[in-house]
Amino acid sequence: MKFFEPSSSERRGLLVLSAAIILILMVTLLALLTRASGSSGQDGRQSSSDFVRHTERPTPKYYAVEERDVETFPFDPNTADSTTLLRLGFSPSMVRGMYRYRAKGGRYHEPADLSYVPGMTNELWDRISPYIRIDRKYQYVTPQPRTARPHAMPSGHEQTYVRDTVRYPVKMRVGETVELNQADTSALKKIPGIGSYYARQIVRYRQELGGYTSTDQLQEIDGMPEDVGQWLRLDASLVQPIDVNHATKNQLLRHPYLRTYRARAIWDYRHNFGPLRGIDDLRRLPDFTEADIERLRPYLEFR
């Protein structure tokens, strides 16, 4: 049986081969153990960081409004799109309100109509009002004088033309005047250059103001002829001022020189500090400039 017994050199070779295989297996096993240990440590750190991140109080996020460069250029509020209105400085809420108003069939017939848009500020109005352009198709119709109509005459006679003095009143002559704070639309239509539309606008604005203190105030009506003052006389004592400390909020809001922000400022002052003692108290309110106060002086009383 010694035929199958390995020699001493063969035994040494087998021992070296076994040792090499064991060494390779140990190195491989050690590498696997090291990789497993590293990945588990990394997972531990990752899960730990995830826990910290999820348990930390989230940073509050606020609605950010993109700042825009305000521009000024002519526009028609009846056709301007949202991009145009935003470029002019209108806020998104004002644009949405104008779109809803137009979607319901509303139209801006004159520049002053735009001042009633909720959110309109004095700064925005003063900047854009000179650039409002109302297309003719949105403006109210101003009645045009008709040509004199012929009256039938007996055969053999020429036709003559008779002026309809009932429909078209005779205009005033040079030197004649009408009292601005008392005249009705019929009297105002006798002024050269004044038709039914401007007569109604003069009366409407007089009612909103409480009376005119100067004929120059007529130029605050869009398109009013500049020479209309020569046909007018004025009794400023007929002005009806607003009782600031007893007027309702709607009464304050309707006055053209107060509108939204100034009316609210007066209303808030009354509720926070009590009655206003005089015109000088308005100087405490940031919404009133010195020019605003002087313009309002004839229209306010403090009881």
Image (tube, rainbow, N blue to C red):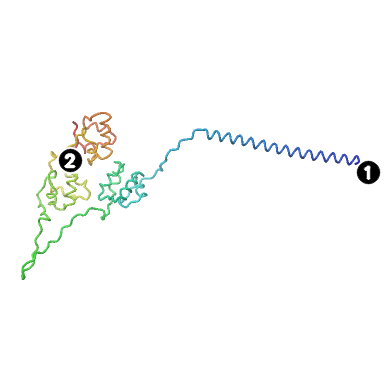
Amino acid residing under circle 2: Gly
Find numbered disc 1 in the image and state the secondary structure of the residue it sits on: helix
On screen, residue 269 above or below 199: above
Number of the label disc, if any, that sits on residue 3: 1
Which sits in the foreground, 58 or 68?
58
- Give the residue displayed 12% in from the left and 62% down from the top: 149
Which sits in the foreground, 152 or 135?
152
Image quadrant where residue 234 sits: top left
- Give the residue displayed 27% in from the left and 52% down from the top: 134
Mark 1, Cα crowd under 10 Å, few <14 / some 14-19 / many 20+, is few
Number of the label disc, if any, that sits on residue 210: 2
The C terminus sits in image quarter: top left
Q: Furthest residue to the right?
A: 2
Which sits in the foreground, 128 or 40?
40
Alpha carbons under labels 2 and 1: distance apart: 138 Å
Whole-percent x, y for residue 250 in the image: 24, 38
Amino acid residing under circle 1: Phe
Whole-percent x, y for residue 125 in the image: 29, 44
**22 left or right, relative to 132:** right
Find numbered disc 2 in the image and state the secondary structure of the residue it sits on: loop
